[in-house]
C-alpha cells in the first residue's frame, strides 16, 4: 500500500461542476500535472505541496461530516498512492475523481465516480487524450469537455457521437473556457442543435469570484 501522497491543499466548499454542482464537498487537491492547458486555473498545483498520509486524509474527510469528497489536481493519477487513497475514501462516503484524461482510468476503484476530462484542440493538450478511457466509462461516470470556441464545440460533438457518450455514461458536460467562450454563446449552440449535453458552469467562481484557491 502507498501510504502517502503529495497534497497541494485540502478544503471544504461547494462542488462547482458536474451533476454534483451545489453539493457540500471535501476537496483533496494533489500536486503535479503532466499537461499545460492554456486555460488552466490551478497552476499553483503544478508543483510544491506536502506529503500527507492517506489515512489522515480519509480521517479528515470523515471529520468534515460532508456527504461528498473529490480528489482532484493537478492530475491525481500521476501519483501511485491515489488508488489506495480512493479505496479508503469510498468506504467513508461518495467519492469523485477528476482526471485530465491522459491516464488509464480502468484501475480506478469500483464505486468511485470518475469525472473524465476530454481535452479539446483549443486546450493545446488534445494529443494527450487516452482514448481507450471512453470505452471503459461506467454508467455513473461523467465526461467534461472545456471549449475554447466553435471549433472545439464541433469537435466535442463528433467525439460525443463517435463514442456514444450520451448512452455510455451518466452525463456529458460542455464547459465554456473562462475568458475564451461566453456561456451565453455555448448555451445558444446547445439549444439550437438540441444537443443532449449539460451546460457546465463553474458555480464556485460565481459565488467566490475573487478567490484564487481553496474554493
Image: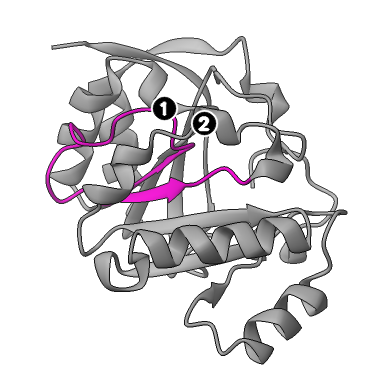
Residue found 27% across the figure and 73% down from its top: 167
Instruction: Please name the predominant secondary structure of the magenta segment in the image.
Output: loop
Q: Secondary structure at mark 2?
A: loop
Residue 158 vertical placement versus 37 (above, below): below
Residue 180 vertical placement versus 103 (above, below): below
Q: Which residue is mark 2?
A: 73
Specify the segment rendered in magenta.
95-120
Q: Which quarter of the figure has residue 157?
A: bottom right
What sort of colour scheme is used for the picture? one colour
Residue found 32% across the figure and 54% down from its top: 65
The crowding category of the residue bearing disc 2, from other C-alpha atoms within 10 Å (few below 14, some 14 to 19, many at least 20), is: many
Q: Which mark is residue 76?
A: 1
The answer to whether residue 72 is seen in the rendering is: yes
Q: Position of residue 160 (x, y in %)?
A: 44, 64
Q: Position of residue 140 (x, y in %)?
A: 24, 63
Residue 11 or residue 2, whichever sits in front: 2
Amino acid at each position: 500500500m502507498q501510504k502517502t501522497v503529495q497534497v497541494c491543499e485540502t478544503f471544504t466548499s461547494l462542488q462547482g461542476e458536474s451533476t454534483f454542482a451545489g453539493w457540500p464537498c471535501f476537496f483533496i487537491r494533489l500536486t503535479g500535472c503532466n499537461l499545460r492547458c492554456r486555460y488552466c486555473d490551478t497552476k499553483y498545483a503544478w508543483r510544491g505541496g506536502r506529503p500527507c498520509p492517506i489515512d489522515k486524509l480519509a480521517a479528515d474527510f470523515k471529520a468534515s461530516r460532508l456527504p461528498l469528497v473529490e480528489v482532484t489536481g493537478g492530475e491525481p493519477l500521476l501519483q501511485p498512492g491515489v488508488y489506495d487513497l480512493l479505496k479508503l475514501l469510498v468506504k467513508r462516503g461518495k467519492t469523485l475523481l477528476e482526471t485530465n484524461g491522459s491516464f488509464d482510468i480502468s484501475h480506478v476503484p469500483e464505486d468511485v465516480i470518475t469525472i473524465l476530462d476530454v481535452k479539446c484542440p483549443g486546450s493545446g493538450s488534445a494529443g494527450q487524450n487516452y482514448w481507450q478511457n471512453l470505452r471503459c466509462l461506467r454508467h455513473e461516470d461523467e465526461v467534461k469537455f472545456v471549449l475554447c470556441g466553435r471549433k472545439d464545440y464541433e469537435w466535442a460533438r463528433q467525439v460525443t457521437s463517435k463514442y456514444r457518450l450520451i448512452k455510455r455514461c451518466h452525463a456529458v458536460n460542455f464547459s465554456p473556457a473562462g475568458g475564451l467562450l461566453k456561456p451565453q454563446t455555448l448555451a445558444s449552440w446547445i439549444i439550437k442543435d438540441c444537443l443532449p449535453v449539460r451546460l457546465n458552469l463553474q458555480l464556485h467562481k460565481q459565488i467566490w469570484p475573487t478567490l484564487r484557491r481553496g474554493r
